[in-house]
């Protein structure tokens, strides 16, 4: 397909136009503006003497004009009528007098695309909270309009052309009967420190084992810590669990996992019992018992670390990135939804997620009654506030993306065979 500039004086007669229409070569015609298109139609009508043609030849000329300009036959008919009555063709369209002023400008759409690119396109509510925090907490004046955007209009901006131009096998566990741990759902009763834990495997490739991620989420505050180990054997898992329990700022009271043997074993049970941590496991046919951490496996671990195979020998580098970059971003800068439980007219318990309950896990921790009493000895909210305000939400997301690219580039380079 090629683009040409057509000169009407090269087609002297209607027969030449008819021969042009019967050609098999696919052509594309491009006009600089609508005014140039109308001017070309006007010149063509005069050059071919349209007003003096018979009905059949006029039909040929209309087909010719429609093919070249891309306008419909009805549009061509209206333009010919205008030329016959006034002697010229002019675009009479203008901006409607009652047009509503645009509240959100192109720079706002570009700013929204930037936020989505930094944070990985979170939900509309979470993105609203990020814009609100950027303006009210961190004083970024660029977010003045986006800080008050509605959830519905945020998605309208995401679907706009301006926004679109800027953006575009897990092994099953084997059943076994183990008496370790109590088979029930944890009962935190509004207290932090009850962890939901699960393992995510980074896959095998050509006989090379991939590393494993240990994902732990507090049920009440949704504070989250992700660790990576080369294997899930006792040699690697016990030091990682100790590191995981130390990474949370509050005292750990409960440890809930599914029925995988990596956690439901005597060694882990002994470690948790020594720390006076209650060990529970998921019940049979109760798929929601560990749903919180399983949802975080997809929305956090897979989103930021992907599905591609990562050899186990890179576990230390990935684990360092998890602790120093990913976990602080999740806990201090990524908003989460927290439910309100209501009883409907049938007496059933329902969960609602109002916008007022959208906050970061650290904000949720601070909002709990007697939150200071839940912190570990030697840890204060002043220390945690310093960590939270060290970076803005957008700066933390930018640091996350840059360091993740460096990490993946290191892994990719190390995996390439020497020339």
Image (cartoon, grey):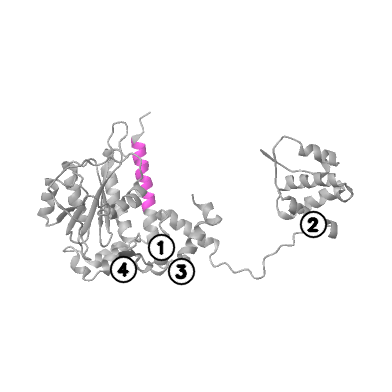
Q: Which residue is mark 3?
A: 148
On screen, residue 186 versus residue 206, left or right, reads: left
On screen, residue 233 versus residue 132, left or right, reads: left
Name the mark on residue 188.
none
**SS state under label 2:** loop
Eyeballing the image, is 346 above or below 231?
A: below
Q: Which is more foreground, mark 2 or mark 4?
A: 4
Closer to the N terminus: mark 3 or mark 1? 1
Closer to the N terminus: mark 2 or mark 1? 2
Residues at marks 3 and 2, CA–CA distance in whole angstroms: 46 Å
Residues at marks 2 and 1, CA–CA distance in whole angstroms: 50 Å
Q: Is residue 69 in view from this perspective?
A: yes
Please give the name of the residue rendered at 38% of the width and 51% of the height, measured from the top-left corner: 401
Q: Which is more foreground, mark 3 or mark 4?
A: 4
Q: Residues within 10 Å of mark 3 (few under 14, many from 20)?
A: few
Chain part drawn in magenta: 400-414
Residues at marks 3 and 4, CA–CA distance in whole angstroms: 28 Å
Please give the name of the residue rendered at 21% of the width and 68% of the height, measured from the top-left corner: 372
**SS state under label 1:** helix
Q: Residues within 10 Å of mark 2 (few under 14, many from 20)?
A: many
Q: Which residue is mark 1?
A: 125
Name the mark on residue 342.
4
Q: State the image quarter where residue 336 is shown.
A: bottom left
Q: State the image quarter where residue 307 is shown.
A: top left
Asked if residue 404 is among those painted magenta in the image, a careful observer would answer yes
Q: Which residue is mark 2?
A: 89
Q: Position of residue 269 (x, y in %)?
A: 12, 50
Please give the name of the residue rendered at 38% of the width and 56% of the height, measured from the top-left corner: 397
Q: Residues within 10 Å of mark 1 (few under 14, many from 20)?
A: some
């Amino acid at each position: 397909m090629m683009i040409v500039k057509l000169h009407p004086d090269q087609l002297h007669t209607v027969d030449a136009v008819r021969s042009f229409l019967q050609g098999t070569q696919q052509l594309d015609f491009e006009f600089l503006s609508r005014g140039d298109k109308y001017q070309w139609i006007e010149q063509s009508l005069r050059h071919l003497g349209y007003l003096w043609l018979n009905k059949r030849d006029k039909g040929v000329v209309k087909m010719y004009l429609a093919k070249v300009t891309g306008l419909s036959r009805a549009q061509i008919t209206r333009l010919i009528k205008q030329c016959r009555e006034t002697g010229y063709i002019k675009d009479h369209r203008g901006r409607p007098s009652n047009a509503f002023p645009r509240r959100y400008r192109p720079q706002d759409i570009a700013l929204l695309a930037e936020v989505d690119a930094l944070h990985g396109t979170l939900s509309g509510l979470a993105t609203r909270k990020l814009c609100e925090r950027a303006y009210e907490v961190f004083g970024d004046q660029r977010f003045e309009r986006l800080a008050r955007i509605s959830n519905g209009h945020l998605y309208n901006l995401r679907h706009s052309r301006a926004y679109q131009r800027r953006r575009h096998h897990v092994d099953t566990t084997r059943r076994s009967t183990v008496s370790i741990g109590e088979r029930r759902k944890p009962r935190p009763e509004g207290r932090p420190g009850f962890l939901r834990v699960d393992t995510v495997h980074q896959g095998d490739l050509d006989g090379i084992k991939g590393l494993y991620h240990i994902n732990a989420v507090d049920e009440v505050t949704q504070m989250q810590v992700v660790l990576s180990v080369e294997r899930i054997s006792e040699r690697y898992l016990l030091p990682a669990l100790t590191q995981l329990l130390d990474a949370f700022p509050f005292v750990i009271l409960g440890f809930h996992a599914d029925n995988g043997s990596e956690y439901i074993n005597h060694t882990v049970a002994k470690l948790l019992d020594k720390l006076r941590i209650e060990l529970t496991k998921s019940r049979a046919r109760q798929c929601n018992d560990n749903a919180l951490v399983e949802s975080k496996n997809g929305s956090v671990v897979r989103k930021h670390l992907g599905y591609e195979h990562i050899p186990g020998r890179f576990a230390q580098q990935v684990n360092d990135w998890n602790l120093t970059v990913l976990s602080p971003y999740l806990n201090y800068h990524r908003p989460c939804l927290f439910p309100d439980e209501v009883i409907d007219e049938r007496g059933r318990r329902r969960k609602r997620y109002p916008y007022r309950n959208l906050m970061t896990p650290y904000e949720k921790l601070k909002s709990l009654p007697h939150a200071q009493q839940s912190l570990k000895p030697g840890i204060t909210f002043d220390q945690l506030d310093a960590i939270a305000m060290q970076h803005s939400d957008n700066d933390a997301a930018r640091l996350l993306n840059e360091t993740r690219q460096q990490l993946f580039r290191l892994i990719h380079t190390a995996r390439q065979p020497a020339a």
